[in-house]
Amino acid sequence: MTSENEDTGAPAGDLEITPAGAGVEIRATASTGALAFVCTPSRARELATALGLAADEAESARSADPVTVRADGLRRGDVRDGDRAMTVDSVRIDGATAHITWKSGAGRSWTQLYDAGTRITLRRRGR
């Protein structure tokens, strides 16, 4: 994956992620040099989670004011407004009850039941 400086359009470097035996190699190259390291699949997943959380924070910093929706209007990818990142993983509506499965930034999942009309404030709408 190649990136560029958003201000100048100049190439900023390349990032390569590949399997390396029982590990995952991450190699970053730029005009100033290169950096490579190998980590376990578990650590690679932790890095991916941390990158996802940082991306969520960056997007929410640029987004408009929080939006409030009914529980039965939630959709996968919605991020709840609050101190901790909670993302909607799935939604199931059963009559007047919304079964919302949330996923934390650490990868934990749980399901909460809401009255379908309950208003929930979101930091960011899913796509």
Image (cartoon, rainbow, N blue to C red):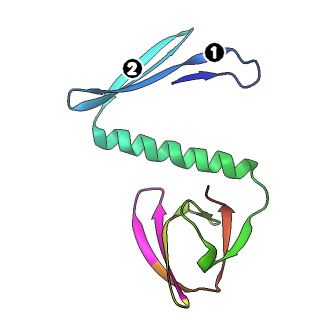
Find numbered disc 1 in the image and state the secondary structure of the residue it sits on: strand
Callout 1 environment at 10 Å: few (<14), some (14 to 19), or many (20+)?
Answer: few
- Which mark identifies residue 105? none
Q: Residue at x 52, y 46 (%)?
A: 52
Find numbered disc 2 in the image and state the secondary structure of the residue it sits on: strand
Q: Position of residue 20 (x, y in %)?
A: 26, 25
Q: Residue at x 77, y 23 (%)?
A: 7
Of the two numbered discs 1 and 2 on the same chain, state the one appearing first in sequence: 1
Q: Amino acid at mark 2?
A: Ala
* Of the two numbered discs 1 and 2 in the rendering, the one whose residue sits closer to the viewer: 1
Residue that sits furthest to the bottom in the current view: 96
The range drawn in magenta is 97-111
Q: Is residue 56 above or below residue 87?
A: above
Q: Position of residue 122 (x, y in %)?
A: 66, 66
Question: Which residue in the structure is indicated by mark 1?
Answer: 11
Report the side of 5 relative to 89 (left or right): right
Residue that sits furthest to the left in the current view: 22
Q: Position of residue 94 (x, y in %)?
A: 48, 86
Question: Which residue in the structure is indicated by mark 2?
Answer: 36
The image quarter containing residue 32 is top right
Q: Amino acid at mark 1?
A: Pro
